[in-house]
Image (spheres, grey):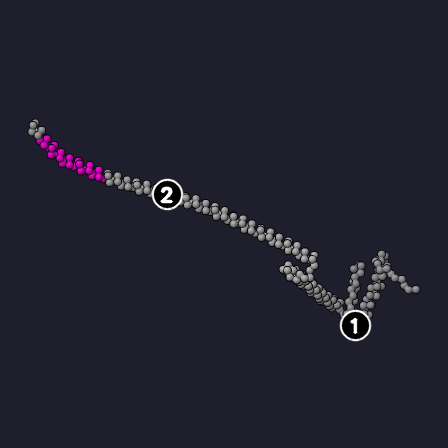
């Protein structure tokens, strides 16, 4: 009778588990040694038990085997990543190319070209799409026109306000000029009056200064004669 199949699962009994570990460990190391000798292969085996013990076998040197393994694994990862990256960009390029073709075909149909292969349903859908697009374009145009009108109104109000302010400033300047003219005319009139009054006063002073001189010249001899006569009489 042949041996029955053993269920591969953890052995609960610690003694049986340790015995099985020892047997299979020795068998694994033996098979690795035979593989290295028979096939001229570089083999390295590392085993850690559940208790932390370390067992290993290497056909040459465990360090060289580990370095070769790390180098080969890194190259495989790089090759796999580069290959997958190339495949990814190829799929992206194919998808973008197809999208470009679809857009170009849709553009030609919107422009009224290449409509022979379309059915009535496709033509109706295209017509609805054009109507929606045209409605959107008109709405956008109306909005832009309204914005421009509002902007022009705002600028017109600003210009009107600036004109009002400039008009008020001009009126103020005119009033100031008129007041300055009035002050200048008043001052000139006062200067003329002062000049005339000074001239008049000078003439009056001159006349007043001449009259007493004449009276003195005329009255002086009379007074002396009167005194002489009165002395004679006395």
Q: Secondary structure at mark 2?
A: helix
Q: Any magenta on residue 208?
A: yes
Residue 63: in sight, yes or no?
A: no
* Residue 40 marker: 1
Residue 9 lies in quadrant: bottom right
Q: Nearer the viewer, residue 191 or 133?
A: 133
Image position, residue 234 (x, y; %):
7, 27
Q: Relative to 80, is 212 on the left or the right? A: left
Image position, residue 47 (x, y; %):
79, 63
Q: Which residue is mark 2?
A: 178
Closer to the chain start, of discs 2 and 1, is 1
Q: Residue at x 39, y 44 (%)?
A: 174
Residue 113 lies in quadrant: bottom right
- Quadrant where the N terminus sits is bottom right
Part of the protein shown in magenta: 202-228
| Main secondary structure found in the magenta portion | helix
């Amino acid at each position: 009778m042949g041996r029955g199949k053993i269920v591969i699962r953890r052995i609960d009994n610690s003694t049986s588990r340790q015995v099985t570990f020892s047997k299979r460990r020795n068998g694994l190391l033996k098979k690795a040694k035979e593989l290295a000798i028979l096939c001229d292969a570089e083999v390295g085996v590392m085993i850690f038990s559940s208790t932390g013990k370390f067992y290993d076998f290497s056909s040459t040197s465990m360090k060289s085997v580990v370095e070769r393994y790390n180098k080969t694994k890194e190259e495989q990862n790089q090759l796999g990543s580069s290959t997958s990256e190339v495949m990814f960009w190829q799929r992206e390029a194919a998808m973008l190319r197809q999208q470009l073709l679809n857009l170009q075909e849709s553009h030609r149909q919107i422009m009224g070209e290449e409509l022979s292969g379309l059915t009535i349903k496709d033509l109706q859908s295209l017509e609805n799409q054009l109507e929606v697009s045209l409605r959107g374009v008109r709405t956008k145009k109306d909005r832009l026109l309204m914005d421009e009108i509002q902007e022009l109104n705002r600028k017109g109000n600003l210009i009107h306000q600036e004109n009002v302010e400039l008009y008020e400033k001009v009126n103020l300047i005119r009033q100031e000029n008129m007041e300055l003219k009035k002050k200048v005319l008043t001052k000139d009139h006062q200067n003329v009056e002062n000049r005339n009054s000074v001239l008049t006063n000078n003439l009056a002073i001159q006349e007043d200064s001449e009259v007493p001189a004449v009276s003195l010249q005329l009255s002086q001899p009379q007074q002396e004669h009167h005194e002489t006569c009165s002395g004679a009489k006395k």
